[in-house]
Image (cartoon, helix red, strand yellow):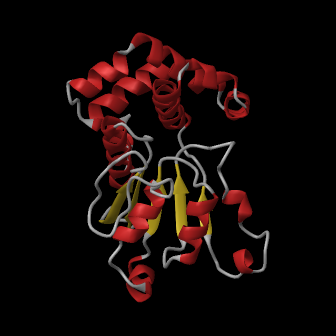
Amino acid sequence: MWENLSPQWQAALEMAWEAYCSGTIPIGAVIADAEGNIYARGRNRIMDTSAPENQVCANELAHAELNALLALKLDYAECKAKNVALYTTMEPCPLCMGAVYMSDVKTLHYAAHDPWAGSTNLLGTTPYLSRKNFKVIAPFDPVLEDCLTALCVESEIQKRGESILSSRFYELLRETLPNAVEKGIALYRSGELRKKQKTELPANQVFDWLAHQVQ
């Protein structure tokens, strides 16, 4: 799977795996052009106690997309000239959807749906959210989507226990991506993903392994 992904997606997955290994929510994001040049990287840092300069951590607002935007050094003219886009492993929440829309980035790619907090549907619902020519590109690879969802499920069970599986969030997730939820539960119970974390396996090997697990 890994070798078939663009450099933009490989970089976003590296950030998601870094987030998982740090003990926070495994979501990663990058800002890049169509040639794969990366201009900014961000990951979830809600549970982190440190962050790179200009990024946020130890706060409920420390989301991957927001941190990627905060790390971006380009101005509007450069973003437009380079035709940059934000690539994120999970559909943005209302906070991040609003932040991307208000930024100089005008294209969003996301790799997995979030039926609970995903908010790309907010576009066009108000005059403000209808005023820009903003593009959203939905998930393109069902296997990658299952990998990322299973990773998040396993991570959440680690933090909150299996009782969360009866929540409304997981009801919605099962309706949308039932296979990914079950694979995430299996990953948690086997402990295999945590073993890979402890051996510091690189993201490319982790996601190739995950692709085999979810199929």
Please report the residue visible at 53 percent of the width from the left and 34 percent of the height from the top: 149
Residue 106 appears in which quarter of the rendering? bottom right
Residue 112 appears in which quarter of the rendering? top right
Residue 46 drawn at (x, y percent): 43, 49
Q: Nearer the viewer, residue 147 or 186?
A: 186
Can you see residue 215? Answer: no
Q: Nearer the viewer, residue 97 or 50?
A: 50
Residue 41 appears in which quarter of the rendering? bottom left
Residue 157 versus residue 45 in the image, above or below:
above
Can you see residue 177? Answer: yes
Residue sitting farthest toward the left:
199
Please report the residue visible at 36 percent of the width from the left and 32 percent of the height from the top: 207
Residue sitting farthest toward the top:
190
Please report the residue visible at 24 percent of the width from the left and 35 percent of the height from the top: 202
Residue 199 drawn at (x, y percent): 20, 24
Residue sitting farthest toward the bottom:
77
Horizontal side of residue 159 vs 124, given as left or right: left
Horizontal side of residue 110 vs 1, given as left or right: right
Residue 44 drawn at (x, y percent): 42, 50
Q: How many marks?
A: 0
Residue 124 versus residue 175 in the image, above or below:
below
Residue 183 versus residue 59 in the image, above or below:
above
Residue 192 versus residue 63 in the image, above or below:
above
Which part of the image, by quadrant, shows the N terminus?
top left
Q: Nearer the viewer, residue 49 or 17?
A: 49
Q: Nearer the viewer, residue 5 or 96?
A: 96
Please report the residue visible at 51 percent of the width from the left and 76 percent of the height from the top: 103
